[in-house]
Image (spheres, grey):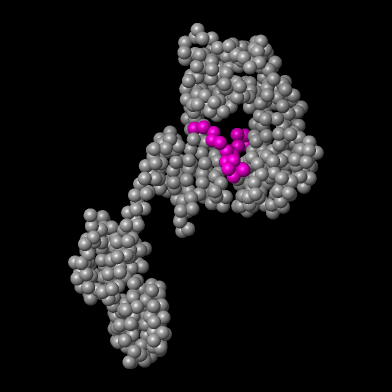
Amino acid sequence: MKIKTLFIAPYPGLKELALTLAKEQQSLDITVVQGDLQEAIPIAKQYEKEDYDIIISRGGTAQLLRLHTSLPVIEIKVSGYDILRILTLVKANSAHLRIIGFPSICQGFVSVSNLLGVHIPYTIIHDQKEVAEAVQQAKTEGAQTIIGDTITCKTAEAHGLQSILITSGRESVIEAFEQAKQTYRIIENTARQTKLYKELLQKTKEPIAVYDENGIIQFASSSFQKVLQLIKNDSDESSIYAYFPFLNNTCAQLCKKIEPLEVSYTFVTDDELMQFRQGYLKADKDENQYYLRFSAEEEEDQEEYSLSVTAIQPIMTSFSQILGNSQLIQTVIKQGRKAATHNAPVALYGEKGTGKKTLAGIIHCESEQKDGFLLLIRIFEDHREIIDYFKRIFAHLEMGTCVLQGVERLRLEHQDHLVRLIHQTKARIIFLFHDNPINLLRQKKLSAHIFKQFKQSQIRLPSLKEYMEDLDEYVRNFIAKYNVKYGKQIVGVQEEALKWLYSRTWKNNLQELSSVIEQAIKFTNNEYISKDDLNNIFKSSDDHAQPGYSVIDLNKPLAEIEKDIIWKILQEEEMNQTRAAKRLGINRSTLWRKLK
């Protein structure tokens, strides 16, 4: 199949030469037309609609066409032979000459003429609008003959000057034909590879999309398109921002700064929790491309880079949303309010599930930094490049709050280096610890310089067992929350069930209590949560159960046995849905479907 080629000749002689040489080209189907500069634009657009593959033109016309067509444009270069022919013609009478042309023409002429000792003044132009002024200036300075391209020669003659057109010879046109063939082969191979990559991405189960800096979606896998269908959006826009307004340009710039790290987000649609990551693609230095990839499950964190970056959407935004009237909770609220009034670093510490991230989000929302990012940076282990990542993140944050978790995993010298970066950033820093920072300092897991940053501002979040008088209030709140989510009308907890809740040791504190109430709401068919409902959730945790041993009733239907096994694994994994699903070899969506 021949390559459909459009040859636009700026002057008649080039058109005739192209028509003659086109007959010798076996692999090119060449259409030759005449058009110079602006005249060539509508011609190119018309043939582009007719599925032409490539355009060949010369000088300023070729450069102009590149701005107005999506087809590749091959420029006929002014060759050394072309220059020698003109210089041979004028060398005997080089006085009163002036070369006027685009850089591609002038630079070659100047180099060759200097070598031959023929010195001709020249004027470089970058736009056809500059031609008239350049010709008039040359005339004023005594030039009588202008050497240039078609538009330059026409303008010179209009000003009463003589002109010499720089023509392209046979060898220049043949070279352009060869370049057209080579360019088409490269484009064809690239298109073939792109098609293969797109097919591969279409087959992957992971929803993924690529979009530009304006949010226009360049590619979306079929699984990604299904995700978009779940999101209520009345707009016909193809912009990613129409679906995810919080993915603004500031987020994109952060991705670009911290590449190859990704920024993680959590998105909820139709009560389905979606984890997705935003990243930057280094495809072209002149174009910024980004991608989104989704997962219905929590992915393994970016341990390859020793840390992860998550843009947090605060669960609560005000201290008035914190439940509990106990003295301990009121003390936390009082300390949190005080921390929100200044921008100095603060440390939050307490057991898992006590609400450290929730409190960090409230402090952010109640502070002067509320209009900026709320970033959670989790450190998994030390790494030689980890400080460089922090430099890039902090340099981007003009305001906002940066929540650091796992600082004690860094070497002490890296912790000290982190302190210097903290002093330079305008963002608010909140540290999260599982253990008391004083203990970490004594164990030499925490740098004295880091500790000094928040020494005067530490907030301990108590475990649930320390304020059990508030448990009833939390239970009522969780029931109301999950009634809405699952369309239930549960009105409370039976007395025996409430006693069971009071007697339980809540290893993961409020996080675990919330999960238990959610499961009870989801699967009970009564108006009140009963003790039996709770026992069904934690069958293997009864006081009478033997360690490492659980009984499965094999007389039940297969579906019920399967459900019992899943509940057992969930309990062993501390109600962590992702870990339970991984152990069972299924995804999280399948896990919940089997429990219904």
Q: Residue at x 47, y 25 (%)?
A: 590
Relative depth, front residue between 494 and 31? 31
Q: Does 310 appear in magenta?
A: yes
Stretch in magenta = 296-319
**Is residue 397 in sight in this rendering?**
no
Q: Does 19 appear in magenta?
A: no
**Is residue 215 in sight in this rendering?**
yes
Relative depth, front residue between 247 and 91? 91
Q: Which residue is drawn at 55% across and 50% down?
A: 259
Q: Where is residue 392 in the image (x, y as percent from the top left)?
A: 61, 52
- On the rendered image, what quadrant is the N terminus found in? bottom left
Q: Residue at x 57, y 14 (%)?
A: 536
Secondary structure that dominates the magenta span: loop
Q: Where is residue 382 in the image (x, y as percent from the top left)?
A: 66, 44
Q: Where is residue 335 in the image (x, y as percent from the top left)?
A: 75, 36
Q: Where is residue 311 in the image (x, y as percent from the top left)?
A: 58, 42
Above or below, comparing residue 347 to residue 526 in the picture: below
**Residue 99 in which image quadrant:** bottom left
Q: Is residue 430 left or right of residue 122?
A: right
Q: In this view, does 9 lie to the left or right of 556?
A: left
Relative depth, front residue between 177 and 371? 177
